Image (cartoon, helix red, strand yellow):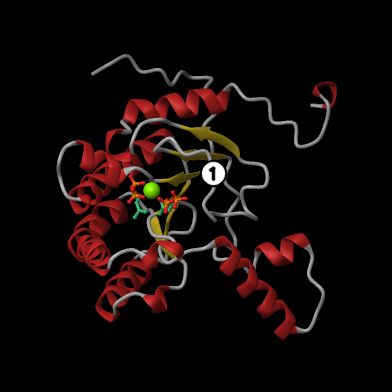
């Protein structure tokens, strides 16, 4: 065990959003198929979730499959669906024990039906847990999410406030992400949580996702803790 870099005064973000990128490149570098990278990425994600909740984080949103990813080769997509089939039930019991709920965000109607059933069951089993939650973004795109919310608002026929609009998004009722982490070297959002991350602190890691360790998560949190969040004000006003 290395030295724990999280100290008593470290500010822990309430909500962390993670873009788990770099699985394919990580596997390729090891002369392995992309699917192997996704499997190792899935296992790493489980470890990171445990670490985050141990540290007192309440919400974690993980970007696991974007709307745009649906145009990847069918073989890769089938491998990803298989991972959900294998890992979801197995892992859900473990997170339930911690009182963590699961919410799937995105257009799940685009997933195979048996996968939809697995996800729905996990959501239902953990629906009683509201204070701590893992949001798994599957077939998710932020623009699609916003358009969906706009259409709901139009149907309701009333003008919306910012709070009212937030409550029409998949993340309704949850605080916005404080810290956004993206692995895999890219410095972009790739259509993730465009509305919710308006004031998120952004941390970009050169590590590929399967090699992003618990210690790397701690480092991101220590970095977050050192940021001054002004929300438009001056230092003197804080
Ligand atoms: C992220 O890893 C996971 C998914 C998008 C499903 P990638 O599959 O994008 O890995 P790279 O970016 O090709 O290395
Ligand atoms: C973003 O990664 C989506 C997920 C991690 C699920 P991508 O690999 O799809 O992003 P781009 O295409 O490089 O922007
Ligand atoms: Mg990628």
Above or below, 173 against 214 in this view is below
Q: Residue at x 32, y 69 (%)?
A: 119
Name the image quarter holding residue 225: top right
Nearer to me, 48 or 194: 194
Label 1 sits on a secondary structure element that is loop
Q: Is mark 1 within 8 Å of ligand 2?
A: yes
Number of numbered discs: 1
Q: Which residue is mark 1?
A: 188
Above or below, 184 against 91 in this view is above
Above or below, 177 against 108 in this view is above
Crowdedness near tag 1: few (<14), some (14–19) or many (≥20) residues, C-alpha within 10 Å: few
Question: Residue 184: x, y in percent?
Answer: 39, 38
Name the image quarter holding residue 67: bottom left
Q: Residue at x 15, y 41 (%)?
A: 31
Above or below, 192 against 70 in this view is above
Q: Check the picture and name the quadrant holding the C terminus.
A: top right
Q: Residue at x 52, y 63 (%)?
A: 141
Name the image quarter holding residue 231: top right
Question: Residue 117: x, y in percent?
Answer: 29, 77
Q: In the figure, is residue 88 to the left or right of 138?
A: left
Question: Residue 83: x, y in percent?
Answer: 21, 60
Q: In the figure, is residue 88 to the left or right of 184?
A: left
């Amino acid at each position: 065990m290395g030295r724990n870099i999280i100290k008593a005064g470290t500010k822990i973000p309430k909500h962390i959003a993670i873009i788990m990128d770099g699985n394919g490149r990580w596997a390729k570098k090891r002369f392995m198929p992309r699917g192997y990278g996704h499997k190792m990425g899935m296992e790493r994600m489980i470890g990171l979730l445990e670490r985050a909740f141990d540290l007192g984080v309440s919400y974690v949103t993980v970007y696991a499959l974007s709307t745009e990813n649906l145009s990847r080769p069918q073989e890769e997509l089938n491998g990803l669906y298989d991972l959900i089939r294998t890992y979801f039930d197995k892992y859900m019991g473990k997170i339930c024990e911690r009182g963590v709920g699961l919410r799937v965000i995105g257009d799940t109607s685009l997933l195979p039906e048996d996968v939809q059933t697995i996800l729905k069951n996990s959501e239902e089993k953990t629906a009683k847990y509201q204070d701590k939650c893992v949001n798994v973004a599957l077939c998710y795109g932020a623009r699609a999410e916003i358009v969906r919310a706009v259409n709901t608002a139009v149907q309701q026929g009333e003008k919306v406030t910012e709070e009212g609009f937030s409550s029409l998004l998949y993340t309704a009722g949850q605080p916005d992400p404080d810290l956004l982490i993206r692995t895999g070297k890219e410095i972009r959002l790739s259509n993730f949580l465009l509305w919710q991350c308006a004031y998120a602190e952004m941390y970009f890691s050169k590590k590929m996702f399967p090699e992003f360790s618990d210690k790397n998560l701690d480092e991101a949190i220590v970095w977050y803790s050192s940021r001054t969040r002004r929300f438009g004000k001056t230092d003197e006003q804080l």
